[in-house]
């Protein structure tokens, strides 16, 4: 499974990328707003840090305008993935941009039918939002499983990019279901390494080693 980080914070991206655990980045207008910086400048900096796909979202709502914005974004770097919403206009834009050889991430997916449309439009990634479905008492993980089955049935090349991740448990469950990618806040990625027994074991080893009075270096 590929790990993307869902943030526009340059320092966080650089720090986590150094661990080798970051395969890509997803951004959106809300994340850019939180950074308080120029949108295009932030995206360019992220692309310089991360060699994998970097999703940059269009802001237009009409297909022609989305296509124009998508082409502009794609000029920033070769690893730009143009993010478009799952609307009919977004699907039109996806088809055009995909046919031009650009990577496209179709976002705000909440049903298997929407995911099927995105795959047929040539999307590189489909982004089903797990947490937002959980918020309205619908199991978001069920949607991941449905999309996986449909894509496998018809051998679509579109990758399932699990989004709106809220917990470390979401990651392991998505991995078991077969999501290709999970995009998560930096805080969730860091929590994947946490376990109380690991901490307890380290404390025990440190205490025992101190009693020996030895040093390796």
Image: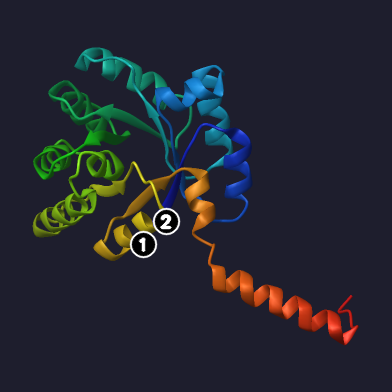
Q: In which quarter of the image is the N terminus?
A: bottom left
Q: Element at badge 2?
A: helix
Q: Is residue 74 left or right of residue 95?
A: right
Does the image show residue 126?
A: no
Location of residue 49 in the rendering, given as x and y in whole percent from the top left corner:
58, 39
Q: Which residue is drawn at 30% across and 58% down?
A: 174
Q: Residue 172 carries which label?
A: 1
Alpha carbon of mark 1 to alpha carbon of mark 2: how far? 7 Å
Q: Quadrant of residue 81?
A: top left
| Foreground residue among 185 and 64 | 185
Find disc 2 in the rendering and name its residue: 168
**Residue 65 horizontal side relative to residue 78, left or right:** left
Please tell me which residue is depicted at 56% across the width and 33% down the height of the picture.
9
Image position of 24 (left or right of 177): right
- Residue 197 in picture, x, y percent from top left: 56, 74
85 left or right, relative to 51: left
Residue 102 lies in quadrant: top left
Percent across and percent down for residue 106 are 25, 34
Q: Where is residue 193 in the image (x, y as percent from the top left)?
A: 54, 62
Task: Count neighbours of disc 1 (C-alpha within 10 A) and say few if under 14, some if 14 to 19, many if 20 or more.
Answer: some
Q: Which quarter of the figure is the C terminus placed in?
A: bottom right
Q: Identify the element where label 1 is drawn.
A: helix
Find out whether the residues at labels 1 and 2 contact each other: C-beta distance under 8 Å.
yes
Would residue 67 be visible to someone looking at this image?
yes
On screen, residue 173 above or below 99: below
Q: How crowded is mark 2: few (under 14 residues within 10 Å), some or many (20 or more)?
A: some
Toward the viewer: 8 or 81? 8
């Amino acid at each position: 499974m590929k790990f993307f980080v869902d943030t526009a914070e340059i320092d966080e991206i650089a720090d986590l990328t150094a661990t080798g655990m970051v395969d890509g980045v997803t951004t959106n207008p809300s994340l850019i707003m939180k950074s308080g910086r120029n949108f295009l400048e932030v995206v360019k900096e992220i692309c310089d840090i991360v060699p994998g796909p970097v999703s940059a979202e269009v802001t237009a709502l009409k297909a022609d305008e989305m296509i124009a914005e998508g082409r502009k974004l794609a000029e920033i770097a070769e690893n730009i993935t143009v993010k478009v919403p799952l609307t009919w206009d977004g699907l039109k834009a996806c088809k055009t941009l995909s046919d031009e050889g650009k990577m496209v991430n179709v976002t705000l997916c909440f049903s298997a039918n929407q995911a099927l449309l995105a795959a047929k439009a040539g999307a590189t990634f489909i982004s089903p939002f797990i947490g937002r479905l959980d918020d309205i008492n619908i199991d978001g993980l069920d949607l991941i499983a449905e999309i996986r089955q449909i894509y496998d049935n018809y051998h679509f090349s579109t990758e399932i990019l699990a989004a709106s991740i809220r917990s470390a448990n979401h990651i392991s469950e998505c991995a078991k279901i077969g999501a290709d990618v999970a995009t998560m806040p930096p805080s969730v990625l860091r929590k994947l390494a946490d376990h109380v027994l690991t901490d307890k074991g380290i404390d025990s080893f440190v205490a025992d080693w101190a009693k020996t009075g030895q040093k390796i270096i």
